[in-house]
């Protein structure tokens, strides 16, 4: 039994925009965080377009060397700390309580404080653009000693460090609230092995946030002290220690940016195939294994330093193939024999798996120290991590948006515009990132603002710039789709896709305490599918009795 | 709540195995310390959930909840606390005034949070009292 309390009677009721911004309803917090993340995505996208314009031809002078360093640093930082990771948490904040039949999130006030800390982090980080000397410019990983006070002086870099501390702290707090919600607030009947796929992916992600983000906060605090005369990361050992601590966060976050979108794609595929997800238990086990291994592979980013045990980290990195293979096997098993409807969400989900496959397969090469010596510091690495981080998140994210938009808003997105959006994103992504494999193999280094005239490099770079423009057009089509779908609404109803999980058992959009009607009995991870199958069985029995009688 | 600590402790155990592997193979103090810290954080979280309710490590579906609980609809205090942390750290770099302003805002936020939590408890007591009346 839940009792809604607004606040003490002595304070006036908070309404309007302030009411939204101070709301402790998990749905409003999720939406606010999501909208802010989307704003940072657009900002990070503008940085990418500026970088690609600079690299369109050899020896371009569109931006200065210093500005280019700021652009690639802020592009990576904005996308990782301010878009992909918080967007994953935003989706979890909105969806997890609904999927597990909870009326609210655990510790909502703490969660709201965390959200505002994260927003402050984003704003502080971007303040660097207005500082003398410019924004942070030591890369999103800001290796010491490159990022220390001598090599990268200026307030902009300090603001970057503080921004990362704030953003990481905020996400850590929100992640903790999601874990606590899953641990404490599941509906009667919702055992752990009856939790929906998306909730499992969210749980594993936020467990990684709780386990690894404290290390990011620690390393950034140490970097701040180091920049102000603390002399912490000095010499070769200091540099290696920084990288070890940073990548202890930096690799798990790759999976934090992947798992929730994998869950979204899996839900979209299972619902559009009108079938249970194949191999649910294997999927859950593979998620746990994937997550644990992902916290034991961090030093594969450091093979070339000579300061790590390559064999151990190559072994754990290659082991990641096993759980990844299980997930692909499950996805194919779900499609076989399904009554497949090729909706936009389904197509985005399938494209997610195909695009991530390219990132995953190239990951096998860079997991091998011998091959990584060749690839390190080249565009091969840029291609690999954009196929995993960009393609491996954005297509799953859009699968989730097209799947759950009707639940969140009560309106359907336009399918035609959605398919145009998908086509543009798929063409743009591959045109931008696939040529990078050839450029990298040919020796083009990453993080350079200009490159010499070299046979083939100009053409491939031009293609990449055109591809980046196509991605931008795709994003504009998506924004237009959202705008027009909200302006001229096509009512979705409560369950337009015949969903499997509890969020489809409530109204669209859901009421303040999520569920007004009693929840259906929970006997598996797909309680609504159970109900429909029982109904079908009863109808069959009636038909047999009628025919026989 | 039932079973809530299980995935956390299972994952902590997987991490422990890998951390031991890391100690044996890598033997670098920083790496070992980082892996051990992660294991301790995850185990700590799992133990906290278990201590909150002992059924957290028992398998099976959760039972229905019968006791009333308060659900806050909004919290200006939480927003103030979040903003104050950002403001204070921003002031550390930009201008000292914002550092002091942030600290002051934090104090105000915590004060208001106390009032909000007390009001929520009062509402719960009131609902419980109404429930007990014949």
Image: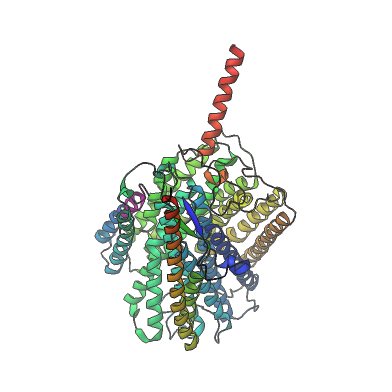
| Image-quadrant location for residue A335 | top right
Q: Position of residue B9 (x, y in %)?
A: 32, 52
Q: How many numbered callouts?
A: 0
Which residue is at the far right? A488
Q: Is B25 positioned to the left or the right of A270 in the image?
A: left
Q: Is residue B43 visible?
A: yes
For this rendering, which residue is in front, B50 or B67?
B67
Vertical placement of residue B86 versus A8, above or below: below
Q: Which residues are magenta?
A: B1-12
Which residue is at the far front? B134
Q: Is B11 positioned to the left or the right of A115 in the image?
A: left
- Where is the C terminus of chain A found, in terms of image quarters? top right
Q: Is A442 positioned to the left or the right of A317 in the image?
A: right
Q: Position of residue A363 (x, y in %)?
A: 46, 56
Looking at the picture, the colour scheme in use is rainbow
Q: Residue at x 53, y 59 (%)?
A: A25
Q: Is residue A40 visible?
A: no
Which residue is at the far top? A549
Q: Position of residue A537 (x, y in %)?
A: 54, 25
| Image-quadrant location for residue A226 | bottom left
Q: Position of residue B62 (x, y in %)?
A: 39, 44
Vertical placement of residue A444 versus A547, above or below: below
As for residue A300 lying within the magenta part, the answer is no
């Amino acid at each position: 039994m839940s009792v809604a309390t607004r606040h003490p009677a002595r304070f006036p009721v908070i309404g309007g925009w302030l009411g939204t911004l101070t709301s402790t309803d998990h749905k409003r917090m999720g939406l606010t965080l999501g909208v802010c993340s989307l704003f940072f995505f657009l900002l990070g996208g503008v940085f990418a377009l500026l970088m690609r314009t600079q690299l369109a031809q050899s020896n371009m002078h569109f931006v200065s060397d210093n500005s280019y360093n700021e652009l690639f640093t802020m592009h990576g930082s904005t996308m990782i700390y301010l878009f992909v990771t918080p967007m994953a948490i935003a989706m979890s904040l909105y969806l997890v309580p609904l999927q597990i039949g909870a009326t609210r999130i655990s510790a909502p006030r703490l969660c709201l404080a965390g959200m505002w800390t994260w927003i402050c982090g984003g704003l502080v980080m971007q303040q660097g653009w207005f500082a003398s000397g410019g924004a942070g410019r030591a890369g999103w990983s800001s290796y010491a000693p490159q990022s220390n006070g001598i090599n990268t002086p200026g307030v902009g870099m300090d603001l970057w460090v503080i921004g990362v501390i704030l953003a990481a702290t905020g996400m850590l707090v929100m992640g903790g609230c999601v874990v606590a919600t899953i641990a404490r607030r599941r509906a009667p009947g919702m055992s752990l092995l009856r939790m929906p796929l998306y909730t499992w992916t969210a749980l594993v992600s936020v467990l990684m946030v709780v386990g690894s983000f404290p290390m990011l906060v620690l390393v950034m605090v140490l970097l701040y002290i180091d920049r102000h005369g603390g002399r912490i990361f000095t010499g070769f050992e200091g540099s290696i220690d920084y990288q070890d601590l940073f990548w202890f966060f930096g690799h798990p976050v790759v999976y934090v940016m992947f798992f929730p979108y994998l869950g979204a794609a899996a839900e979209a595929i299972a619902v559009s195939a009108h079938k249970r997800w194949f191999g649910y238990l294997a999927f859950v086990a593979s998620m746990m294994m994937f997550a644990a291994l992902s916290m034991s592979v961090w030093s594969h980013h450091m093979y070339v330093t000579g300061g790590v045990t390559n064999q151990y980290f190559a072994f754990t990195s290659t082991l990641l193939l096993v759980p990844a293979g299980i997930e692909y096997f499950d996805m194919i098993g779900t499609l076989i024999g399904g009554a497949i409807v090729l909706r936009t969400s389904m197509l985005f989900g399938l494209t997610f798996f195909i695009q991530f496959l390219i990132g995953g397969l190239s990951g096998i090469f860079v997991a091998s120290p011998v091959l990584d010596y060749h690839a390190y510091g080249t565009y091969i690495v840029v291609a690999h991590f954009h196929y995993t981080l960009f393609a491996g998140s954005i297509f799953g994210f859009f699968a989730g948006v097209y799947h759950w938009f009707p639940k969140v808003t009560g309106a359907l997105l336009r399918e035609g515009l959605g398919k145009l959006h998908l086509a543009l994103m798929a063409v743009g992504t591959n045109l931008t990132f696939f040529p990078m494999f050839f450029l990298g193999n040919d020796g083009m280094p990453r993080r350079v603002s200009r490159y010499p005239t070299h046979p083939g490099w100009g053409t491939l770079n031009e293609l990449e710039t055109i591809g980046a423009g196509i991605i931008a057009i795709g994003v504009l089509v998506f924004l237009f789709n959202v705008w027009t779908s909200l302006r001229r609404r096509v009512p979705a109803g409560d369950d337009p896709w015949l969903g499997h999980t509890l969020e489809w058992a409530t109204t669209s959009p859901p009421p303040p305490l999520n569920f007004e009607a009693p929840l259906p009995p929970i006997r598996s991870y797909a309680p609504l599918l159970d109900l429909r199958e029982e109904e079908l069985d009863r109808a069959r029995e009636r038909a047999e009795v009628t025919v026989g009688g | 709540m039932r079973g809530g600590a299980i995935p956390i402790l299972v994952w902590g155990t997987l991490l422990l195995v890998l951390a031991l592997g890391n100690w044996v193979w890598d033997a670098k103090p920083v790496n070992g310390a980082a892996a051990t810290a992660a294991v301790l954080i995850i185990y700590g979280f799992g133990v906290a959930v278990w201590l909150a309710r002992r059924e957290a490590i028992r398998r099976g579906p959760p039972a229905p909840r019968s006791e009333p609980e308060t659900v806050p609809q909004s919290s200006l205090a939480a927003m103030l606390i979040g903003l104050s942390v950002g403001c204070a750290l921003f002031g550390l770099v930009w201008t000292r005034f914002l550092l002091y302003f942030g600290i002051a805002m934090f104090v105000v936020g915590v004060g208001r949070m106390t009032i909000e939590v007390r009001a929520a408890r009062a509402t719960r007591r009131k609902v419980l009292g109404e429930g007990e009346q014949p």
